[in-house]
Image (cartoon, rainbow, N blue to C red):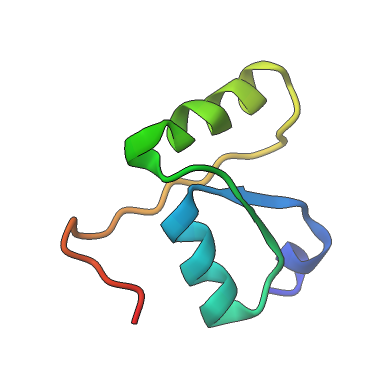
Amino acid sequence: MGMLKICKLIATGTTGQVINEKTQLKVQRMASGSVGGDQMIGAEFAQDRLDCVIFLRYPFNFTSS
């Protein structure tokens, strides 16, 4: 996790919330994926504003608690 502390992190809404709650890493949260957050991150990548993209997969019935 040490290397991630020096990176600018962005994520879709719920994923960003979970990452922040579980790791205390600072995460810029975009919209939820279901309302365009994935596309917002894709646009950042297309404009060469991101160095890396990591996809996390979890069940649709996931809750952050």
Front in this rendered view, residue 10 or 35: 35
Q: Tell me if residue 44 comes above or below residue 60 in the rendering.
A: above
The quadrant of the picture occupied by the N terminus is bottom right
The quadrant of the picture occupied by the C terminus is bottom left
Residue at 49 percent across and 47 percent down: it is 12
Query: How many marks can you see?
Result: 0
Residue at 64 percent across and 39 percent down: it is 52
Residue at 73 percent across and 21 percent down: it is 48
Front in this rendered view, residue 23 or 1: 23
**Residue 9's spot in the image, x, y percent?**
68, 53
Q: Quadrant of residue 60?
A: bottom left
**Residue 42's spot in the image, x, y percent?**
54, 26
**Residue 28's spot in the image, x, y percent?**
67, 53
Task: State left or right for residue 25 relative to residue 30.
Answer: right
Residue at 27 percent across and 59 percent down: it is 58
**Residue 17's spot in the image, x, y percent?**
51, 66
Q: In which quarter of the image is residue 45?
A: top right
Task: State left or right for residue 41 relative to residue 26.
Answer: left
Q: Which residue lies furthest to the right in this view?
A: 6
